Image: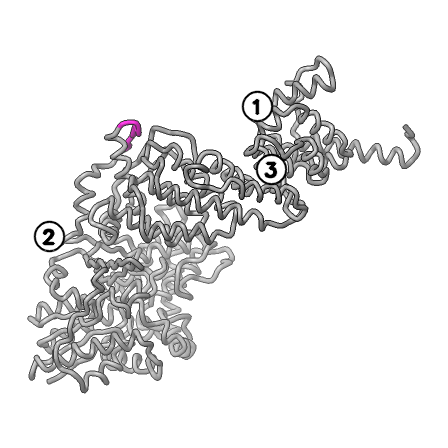
Amino acid sequence: MTVTFLGVRHHSPACARLVADTIRSVRPAYVLVEGPADMNHRMDELLLGHELPIAVYTSYRDPERRHGSWTPLCDYSPEWTALTAGHEAGAELRFIDLPAWHPALADVRNRYADAEARYSEVTGRLCRTFAVDNVDALWDHLFEIEPDDGLAERLATYFELVRGDTRAGPDDLAREAYMAQWVRAAVADAGDRPVVVVTGGFHRPALIRLAEQGDRSWPEMPEPPAEATVGSYLVPYSFQRLDAFDGYQSGMPSPGYYQHLWESGPADAARGLTERVTARLRARRQPVSTADLIAARATADGLALMRGHPHPARVDVLDGLAGALVSEAIETPLPWAARGPLRAGSHPVIVEMIAALSGDRVGRLHRSTPLPPLVHAVLAVLGGPGEERLDLGEEADRERSRLLHRLRVLRIPGVARTSGPRPAGGTELVERWSLTDSDDRLPALIEAGGYGVDPQEAAAAALAERIRGADLDQLADVLFDTALCGIGELTGQVLDDLARAVGAAVDLGPLGRTLTVALAMWRHDHLFRTSGSTTVGTIVRAATRRALWLAEGVRGGPAPADLPRINAVMAVRDALRHAGASLGLDRDAALGVADRLAASQEAPPDLRGASLGLGWSLRGTAAADPARAVRGAFVPASAGDWLAGLFALAREEVLHTDGMLELLDELVGGMTDHEFLVALPALRQAFGFFPPRERHLIATRLVERRAGGASGWDLMRLDAAPDLVAAGMALDERVEAALRREGLITS
């Protein structure tokens, strides 16, 4: 009996060649591969003849959480060559890792992104020893461009060194114990025939040790919780999603380059990389001369020779291209000197170089591949590309709109709304949509299938997840999306999550926006069938109470009027007016808060004015004596901000209360020139709450009071910008002060 443990780096052409060559050489009884064991009974599906890259996508959903993860495979993945070479050799193929939904993998979004961060200290020392920038350059230096002679021994030494005394966490221990039991069982069943085990190099030392003794029976397959929904499907993947420069954290960056390396070897890959970069830059009208190419290749060859490479490695070619094609100073580090996404501000030529390395390959599934029900449900009704105009007054168009909104909520590519109803906007009965083809649509639909079997169920689950993760500023949009999707009542845990989000609000402005949208939906959204909704009513009630509580705690001196805060008080007023009786809102408690805030010198001016307006609009009077209340609250230094709050909440009451405009004219007219200039921008904002017709009425009444028969329109028309007028008035005031100071005027 012989067990060959091959520790690999995921998505490494050198490891993929080693795995395939080893399996062809030893012709094992079993090939055991790090991968989701719950896919073993579907191995034939995996080997149908897909165009790689592809991935196994697993979705998990229970009442508490949803989790999605991927097991990606490309032509040069060692796991893939283990399966294909093992199949050709007649071996039994088994994935031996825990299923992706298992708690040990609960934080793993990508099964093959699980190792390098653990031993960064060791690889850091190796990078310094070999004078390379990062682990990718180190890997190329040690393995990818070196001859394959002795590769297995070098890999084993490398992974023994990097694992060293690293303490594995409980999740790793659980995975390694499970994989080791598969190894022991396969060895027992194979008898004298060999077994090949292919796993990430991090796990290899532990598996060698654990495989020596223990239970030799086949491990049981873990079962998900009874209340959980779990599904695994093959999905098309892309080089872009594999690329470390796009955020992928395992295996190799620049998958297009490594595909060429896998197919043609390091020398051809270097030449091909230069050609692809040149073609891409020229296609974007970037000048690349023959002399530039000669200089880039000469530099790359010189760097390879200096670094001890038998052929130019990826970083040699990139450094050579950067030196030849970028003549300006580069403000950000070269991206191949580190891992992770490109930084903002990267040079445009560098960005195009990275894109050329990434490649644009997109995988395709074999036509016989099983797909989740959601895919069939959507593709049967979605239709082809084009523009659609939907009349929401028609039931058929309204149902089509709901379908498209469900796909939009599920983030299906190629489905975009260009116009239509907006949260708290006016009634709009026409929607326009743009439908386009997208290579990413099928993967997105397969992944969205984890939410449900049809668009309505899937969108409802996606919206529930958004509600749980939304901050208060996003909650109004989520509520409106729920209406657009026609999901209907959300109850149970989702309703609790909504109420909890509102109850935990700490910012009055976003809470007011949520209340505004929810109240509009509860009052009169017959179009989307939310009028009178119990769920939305619950949100209105909770948001009104929370807003009053938050408002009473706001403190602050003079400051620019906060329009979101004023709008929140307006939303409270409208809720009390239009839903108070139906939803059991406490009007007397709200009036008490309004009166206390209106009289508080610690509250900001805009909130004091809005609170006075709230009490005035709900009672029909500003306490017993409106004029006295206004006169007592008016402070010249903050007059504009205070009036903004008052006008927003009680515009009509101010306009139609006898003597109120005249009182305000008296108060504003009594301000000094300096006080007026300081207050002018805020005063303009405050009077902006009056529509044009009412501003004309105010102007007419003031003209009658001050100038007899002049026209009110003349006060509303300025030939110059208001800020220029204010600057001119300030200049006049300074000139007059200087003249008085010098005794040139005395009156």
- Mark 3 or 1, which is nearer the eye? 3
> According to the image, label 3 marks what residue?
645
- For label 2, the SS is loop
Badge 1 crowding class, 10 Å Cα cut-off, few under 14, some 14 to 19, many 20 or more, is few
- Mark 2 or 3, which is nearer the eye? 3
Between the residue at mark 3 and the residue at mark 1, the CA separation in whole angstroms equals: 19 Å
The front one of 146 and 124 is: 124
Q: Earlier in the sequence, mark 3 or mark 1?
A: 3
> According to the image, label 1 marks what residue?
692
The quarter of the picture where the C terminus appears is top right
- For label 3, the SS is helix
**Residue 120 belongs to the span the image colors magenta:** no
Between the residue at mark 2 and the residue at mark 1, the CA separation in whole angstroms equals: 66 Å
Kind of residue indicated by mark 2: Ser
Q: Residue at x 19, y 57 (%)?
A: 234
Between the residue at mark 2 and the residue at mark 3, the CA separation in whole angstroms equals: 65 Å
The part of the image, by quadrant, that contains residue 85 is bottom left
Left or right position of 21 against 702:
left
Left or right position of 456 against 620:
left
Q: Residue at x 17, y 49 (%)?
A: 373
- For label 1, the SS is helix
Residue 364 appears at what percent x and percent y?
Answer: 19, 52
The part of the image, by quadrant, that contains residue 229 is bottom left
Q: Earlier in the sequence, mark 2 or mark 1?
A: 2
Q: Residue at x 31, y 46 (%)?
A: 490
